[in-house]
Image (cartoon, rainbow, N blue to C red):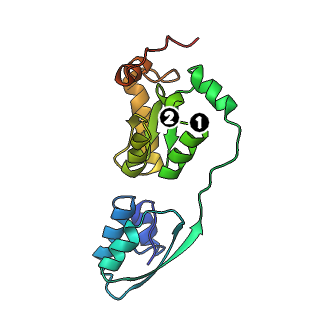
């Protein structure tokens, strides 16, 4: 059984996948797979080494025999964050986006904490990533209802259209009010 994050009709009509979930997170994938009947099915689950345990647990609960293979591992890069810190401090960053919990954890760790991100809009691809961001002290301003890159892009465009700050700092006064910090002035 294969699944994919693309338009359902395109991939299924071509016979390339068996299941396309309605929701692109482990719970949605499990629900879509379980709807097909998993009792007695053998599943090879290739995924990140640090992935959440919910998907294999739900599949096993539905009667599947699940083998897991860690097909990739996320790792914190060794990089100099001086320029990033300087850009954040100067108010030159409008938005920081995250597409997984590991990217949130690694980025915050590389910055030695969430403080440099307090007045920057934060966009997260979905609720699991957003939850991790909030746990680390970030204020999530953008989260699409569908957990895809196109939906995140649409949500970002809508955010900047609403805030009237496209191309400039994303509503710093609003972000500062909610964080208790003084707002920055306009950028030159």
Residue that protrudes farthest toward the bottom in the picture: 40
Residue 88 falls left or right of residue 3: right
Q: Which residue is mark 2?
A: 114
The residue lying at 28 percent from left, 74 percent from top is 35
Q: Position of residue 19 (x, y in %)?
A: 39, 71
Q: Which residue is mark 1?
A: 111
The residue lying at 41 percent from left, 75 percent from top is 18
Q: Position of residue 86 (x, y in %)?
A: 64, 25
Tag of residue 28: none
Q: Position of residue 171 (x, y in %)?
A: 42, 21
**Label 2 residue SS:** loop
Disc 2 residue crowd, few under 14, some 14–19, many 20+, Cα 10 Å: some
Q: Which of 60 and 142 lies nearest the eye of the viewer?
A: 60
Residue 143 falls left or right of residue 77: left
Rendered position, 155 above or below 120: below
* The C terminus, quarter of image: top right
The residue lying at 43 percent from left, 27 percent from top is 160
Q: Which of 24 and 141 lies nearest the eye of the viewer?
A: 141
Can you see residue 100?
A: no
* The N terminus, quarter of image: bottom left
Q: Position of residue 142 (x, y in %)?
A: 40, 37
Can you see residue 158?
A: yes
Disc 1 residue crowd, few under 14, some 14–19, many 20+, Cα 10 Å: some
Instruction: Say if mark 1 contacts mark 2, CB within 8 Å.
Output: yes
């Amino acid at each position: 059984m294969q699944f994919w994050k693309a338009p359902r009709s395109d991939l299924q009509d071509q016979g390339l996948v068996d299941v396309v979930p309605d929701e692109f997170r482990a719970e949605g994938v499990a629900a879509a797979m379980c709807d097909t009947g998993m009792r007695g099915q053998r599943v090879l689950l290739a995924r990140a080494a640090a992935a959440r345990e919910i998907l294999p647990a739900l599949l096993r609960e539905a009667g599947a025999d699940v083998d897991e293979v860690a097909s990739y591992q996320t790792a914190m890069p060794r990089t100099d964050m001086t320029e990033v810190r300087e850009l954040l401090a100067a108010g030159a960053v409008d938005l920081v986006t995250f597409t997984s919990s590991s990217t949130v954890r690694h980025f915050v760790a590389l910055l030695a904490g969430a403080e440099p991100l307090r007045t920057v809009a934060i966009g997260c691809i979905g609720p699991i990533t957003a939850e991790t961001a909030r746990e680390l002290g970030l204020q999530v301003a953008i989260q699409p209802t569908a957990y895809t890159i196109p939906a995140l892009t649409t949500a970002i465009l809508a955010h900047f259209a609403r805030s009237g700050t496209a191309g400039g700092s994303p509503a710093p006064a609003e972000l500062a009010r909610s964080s208790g910090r003084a707002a920055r002035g306009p950028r030159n």
